[in-house]
Image (cartoon, rainbow, N blue to C red):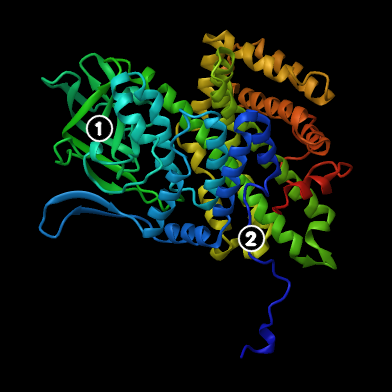
Amino acid sequence: MAGTTHTVTNQAPPLVQYDVFGADRALVEAVERHLAADVLDEGLTELSGLGRTVGSAQVQEWGAQANENPPRLRTHDRYGHRIDEVDFHPSWHRLLGKGVSAGLTGAWGRPGGHVRRAAAFLMWTQAEAGNGCPLSMTHAAVPALRTEPALAAEWEPRLASTIYDRALRPPGEKPGALFGMGMTEKQGGSDVRANTTAARPLAEDGAYELTGHKWFCSAPMSDAFLVLARAPGGLTCFLVPRVLADGTRNVFLIQRLKDKLGNRSNASAEVEFAGTWARRVGEEGSGVRTIIGMVAATRLDCVLGSAGLMRQAVAQAVHHCTYREAFGGKLVDKPLMRNVLADLALESEAATTLALRLAAAYDDGGERERALLRIAVPAAKYWVTKRCAPLAVEAAECLGGNGYVEESGMPRLVRESPLNSVWEGAGNVQALDVLRALRREPEALDAYLREVGRARGADHRLDAAVKDLLTELADLEGVEGRARRLVERLALVLQGSLLVRYAPPEVSDAFCAGRLGGDAGASFGTLPHTLDLASVVERARPVS
């Protein structure tokens, strides 16, 4: 029998067995806003089912197990044969199978596919972020493959499949396939034009032999990889299958797995190619142009992943403070804590609203929407992913010492939070990409200004922010040194315009006051006390 000194009181119950989708008002409203009427009911039913799966005790336990049991590299079998395999905990495979069956690799060919997948991916990140890497790579490989219609016809049905088959065997014998990626090298990093991996043409049309290394290869147990290498005609994109059509394994030498800060359940590897067979994707010398669609898709997944982590951190913080009592009352009712929670909730809702708007632009596919994505995706990737880490740390602090303990789940969110800012180009890369679009593609800026202009006159602080932004854009002299500031304002103005149009007045008012009107401090919890912060917090409370 427990001693009387160990009676447990004043603890929040676990946030479990709930509908992660239905409990996220901002996400539900975004889906309702962007999905066409003829697929809305189907989409809501589908997402609510996934939301209950994500919030279940079983899936949450799988997430913890996958994180606590990272993958192991086996370079050789017991007899000394080179096998280059990575072993994962069973929970990793269970999660990846659930993600594939939920359609997280199949957005490109169904009505409203990008909005539906975006909402699902945002939720699935909250269960366990590591398996999002192969899901994202597989989804994003489609635009690159479509540069070669024959390759797309062969591979796209496998990528869009809802069947997860973990076996290493010829892709033609599998009901579904996953893709990884190998772009960066030791000497170049984000500067892929510095790559030295060599591609030698073979007698077979479109076939090459690769020799070189990759410093980061994502998801090394995938069925195939998109790889950049230097062919006689210049930097070129290639498809590298793990297993060849005759059943033999391609030369794919895994040197080691990265020991990472977070994302522990996922394998990131250093690999060597030594006479590795590859199929060219796109023309020789057009490697960067071939992968640009893939890069944009994975950058949007970075935004979605960060938005998902933010939402889970905020949900945990609000849930804890709703139950926890201190200083004579519930924490959630204390004015200062309410200010912190409301500020966190604003950041989370702004990220979700922006991410789903970008997914809707993919579904629309029109010329103006594509132009908007050219600026909005790197700007959102820059800003949303950068806000994730400070938000996760602040949310963990809302739990006090409990938030510093692994069992709370908050340390895992904190460790994961910087990843999306680094992946697919860190902050400076995103900022420079926005500058390129501003200089070379005037239609992109026009599409952006038309989008934010839809909220003109609805809030004076937003109008003033747009005016200031136009002043900055009119003077691009020496802009590189202030590119981060400019891109931050582009993202904030876009978020503000969306919230003014779509969010409840208390949310848009608080966002414009704190983010655009300058009426807040540098840390979370410094919003003007005169705002309706209680309503903002209540809206973020995870109650289905």
Q: Nearer the viewer, residue 68 or 106?
A: 106
Query: Dot 1: few (<14), some (14–19), or many (≥20) neighbours within 10 Å?
Result: many
Q: Is residue 146 left or right of residue 513?
A: left
Q: Is residue 391 left or right of residue 338?
A: left
Q: Tell me where residue 449 appears, x and y as whole percent.
A: 68, 15
**Mark 2 secondary-structure assignment:** loop
Say the numbered circle drawn on residue 240: 1
Q: Tell me where residue 250 appears, x and y as whole percent.
A: 18, 38
Say the numbered circle drawn on residue 502: none
Type of amino acid at the residue the image marks with label 1: Val
Q: Tell me where residue 310 appears, x and y as whole percent.
A: 62, 45
Q: Tell me where residue 450 appears, x and y as whole percent.
A: 68, 14
- Image quarter (top left, top right, bottom left or bottom right) of the N terminus: bottom right
- The residue carrying mark 2 is 15
**Residue 277 at least partly seen:** yes
Closer to the chain start, of discs 1 and 2, is: 2
Q: Quadrant of residue 330?
A: bottom right
Q: Residue furthest right?
A: 530
Task: Tell me if residue 72 comes above or below residue 501 in the rendering.
Answer: below
Task: Tell me if residue 305 comes above or below residue 187 in the rendering.
Answer: below
Q: Quadrant of residue 471?
A: top right
Q: Name the residue at 74% across, 65% down.
A: 324
Type of amino acid at the residue the image marks with label 2: Leu
**Mark 1 secondary-structure assignment:** strand
Q: Name the residue at 51% across, 15% down.
A: 436
Could you give the CA–CA distance between mark 1 and mark 2, rounded to whole angstroms?
Answer: 42 Å
